[in-house]
Image (cartoon, helix red, strand yellow):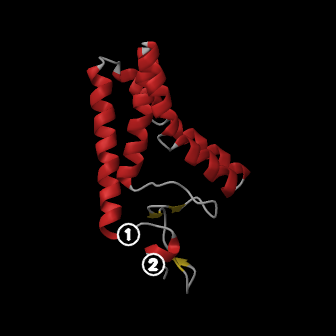
Amino acid sequence: MLSGLTSGSVLGWPKILLRLEGAALMAAALFAYFGLGADWRLLAWLFLFPDLSMVFYLAGPRIGAIAYNTAHTTIIPFAVLGAGVYLGQNLMVSIALIHLSHIGFDRMLGFGLKYGAAFGDTHLGRVGRKVDAEQNTDV
């Protein structure tokens, strides 16, 4: 079995801290979102929107991972947030905060950025069903 150092995934306390960091990101984004007085219905409609990037896995795991990671890094929503604040556009700010809350939610649950080998291979460890390598059966 590969360890975190050789498998490319985080183990132990660093993994717990990254998941707590995700929870903090989600909480802060939602606190700011509702502090703006933004509508909960917009949040309900858009919260899972970044997960539509998974459709790119139909083109293969490498393309899927690129699309998923693009939609699940904080770079774009922070840029939109900054632009929204600068321009005084509350809708842009709201959308960016929803996006950040989704990313935090995923990290809190242990869904990390994807590697191009397979959908379940993430920087926070393998997600999905575990397979026993010796017997090639689900565990």
Against 112, is 67 above or below?
above
Left or right placement of residue 77 versus residue 58 in this view: left
Marks 1 and 2: CB-CB under 8 Å? yes
Can you identify the residue that label 2 sits on?
3
- Residue 40 x %, y %: 34, 23
Against 59, is 37 above or below?
above
Q: Is residue 139 visible?
A: no
Which residue: 29% across, 35% down? Answer: 28
- Residue 123 x %, y %: 48, 61
Which structural element holds mark 1? Answer: loop
Mark 1 or mark 2: whose residue is earlier in sequence: 2
Q: Which mark is residue 11?
A: 1
- Residue 83 x %, y %: 48, 22
- Closer to the camera in the image, 89 or 41: 89
Which residue: 35% across, 56% down? Answer: 18
Q: Is residue 8 visible?
A: yes
